[in-house]
Image: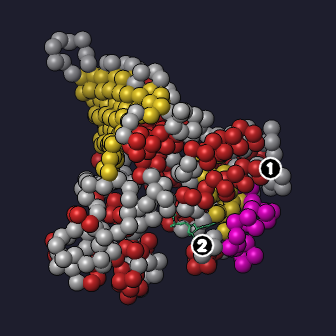
Amino acid sequence: MTRIPGATSDLEPLRLLLIGAGQRGREVYGAEVLAMPHRARFVAVADPDPAARTRFATEHGLPPESCFADWQAALGAVGHDAVVIATPDRFHVEQALAVIASGRPLLLEKPVAVTAEGLRALREAVERHGTSVSVAHPLRSMDFFVRIEAIVHSGEIGQLVAVDHQEDVGYWHFAHSYVRGSWRRADLASPLILAKACHDLDLITHLVGSRATSVASFGDRRHFHSGGAPSGAPARCTDGCPAAAACPFHAPTFYGGLQPGVEWPASVVSPSTDPAALENALRTGPYGRCVYHCDNDVPDHQATIVRFANGAVATLTVTAFAAENTRIITVRGTRGEIRGHLASGRLEILGFPPEGFRSEARRVIQVEAEAGHDAGDRIMVEGFVEHALAVRAGTATPGMDFPEVFHGHAIAFAAEEARLRGSVVSVGVDGPSA
Ligand SMILES: NC(=O)c1ccc[n+]([C@@H]2O[C@H](COP(=O)([O-])OP(=O)(O)OC[C@H]3O[C@@H](n4cnc5c(N)ncnc54)[C@H](O)[C@@H]3O)[C@@H](O)[C@H]2O)c1
């Protein structure tokens, strides 16, 4: 069993290095770890942005010598038992490969890679080094999906035939992140199906319990382009738009009701709590742009069909055109179906009983309503910390938390290829197969 060189005694909290102290790094991993001081603490941070670094260092009481602009220097410095990577998508592979080679357990943000080649490099590195890698797929840990999985595995709905899954991003979340924001362009971040739905493809794969064989996918920018703009709309909302009063995306109204610097996504527009800073960011930065005059290219509606080796079929819709930010799932089995609505926490199990024409057995499970995945994040971080502590103590064997966790990414790469080519694409180990 591998011991991490220089590991401390089991009584000491896990010593973590954070690479990337932005929204996820600070507001999710930072906050979760601050809530478990007896199990883990951040002992170092790496971020090229001095403001992000300083803010994180202040919140975690880190001395200047534990704050790095360069992630490689941070990784080379001794003193951490495990690493969290929460940098923008395109840095993940290079950074993860270095951590995997160091042997320290890694919690890696999704998407783990933005190309099939990157995914293959990661998979091979994990196989070679046997390092523990946990992928940040918080849906897997959420009570709502854990219940669905338990029902499927109990056999209550018979043999699984299909999963119909809908990811309602919400018009407001979509406009912020995928029209104006960091995930608006596939070349800057990653394709929508990967950036937004790798969680869902992972979850579907997990429920189906089989590998995908082929995929078809359709979608484009239906609305968020210059053709959707109201007459006379200027490039920026702050430049006196004639449609301001009727537009659901008018930036000063859109962000103006949120607490500056504190409430997401106003905190992304400007980290300052000063309302004037938010106003200035809207006048000059990316989030004040008219949603019809941005440089976005990711589809705003995408429908995907996946066929699995065991014969099951899944459909996945990712859409901006929804009022709510939620996920709606139907799992179809030979003896019943499960219908779930994440934001309300309601699960219905409808059995097919042997009691005559149109008979139906209905059972309702109400779990705690949650639109986002905060609870999943918490359980995921706790699970990672406990595993890394056990690896440090020599009581757990290092390895992937879920062996098939990269497969959802492979499906996403194949789906994007299918969308761009307009044809059915075979799914290989790391993406489209020839
Ligand atoms: N698991 C989830 O549910 C979930 C949700 C949202 C975002 N994400 C993913 O988390 C990652 C981070 O997203 P975010 O919203 O926190 O982004 P962000 O832009 O708020 O934060 C990224 C941080 O990384 C820093 N950074 C950039 N280059 C770096 C480098 N070379 N070394 C170290 N730090 C560097 C930036 O300065 C910034 O502070 C992305 O990959 C995103 O796709 C995952």
The residue shown at (46%, 21%) is 310
SS category of the residue bearing label 1: loop
Q: Residue 130: x and y, percent?
A: 73, 40
Please state the horizontal and vertical placement of residue 129, each as a whole percent of the image. 76, 42
Circle 1 residues within 10 Å: few <14, some 14–19, many ≥20? some
In the image, residue 191 lies at what x, y percent? Answer: 45, 52
Q: Is residue 298 left or right of residue 387?
A: left
Number of residues whose C-alpha sits closer than 10 Å to that of mark 2, classed few (under 14), some (14–19) or many (20 or more): many
Q: Residue at x 72, y 78 (%)?
A: 64
Q: Position of residue 297 (x, y in %)?
A: 38, 59
Secondary structure at badge 2 equals helix
Q: Tell me, yes or no, whether the highlighted magenta stretch contains residue 419.
A: no
Split into 4 quadrants, where in the image is the N terminus?
A: top right
Instruction: Tell me what residue is drawn at x 33 percent, y 18 percent.
Output: 334
Hey, what amino acid is under mark 1? Ile
Dot 2 corresponds to which residue? 56
Q: Is residue 57 above or below residue 133?
A: below
Task: Find the residue positioned furthest to the right.
Answer: 6
Q: Is residue 111 above or below residue 45?
A: above
Q: Nearer the viewer, residue 66 or 404?
A: 404
Residue 277 numbered mark, or none: none
User: In what quadrant does ligand 1 lie?
Assistant: bottom right
Which sits in the foreground, 64 or 322?
322
Residue range highlighted in magenta: 62-82
Numbered disc total: 2
Q: Does the magenta-highlighted stretch encompass residue 66?
A: yes
Task: Give the residue at mark 1.
Answer: 4
- 44 vs 417, left or right, is right
Query: What's the distance in space between the residues labelled 1 and 2, CA to CA?
Result: 26 Å
Residue type at mark 2: give it.
Phe
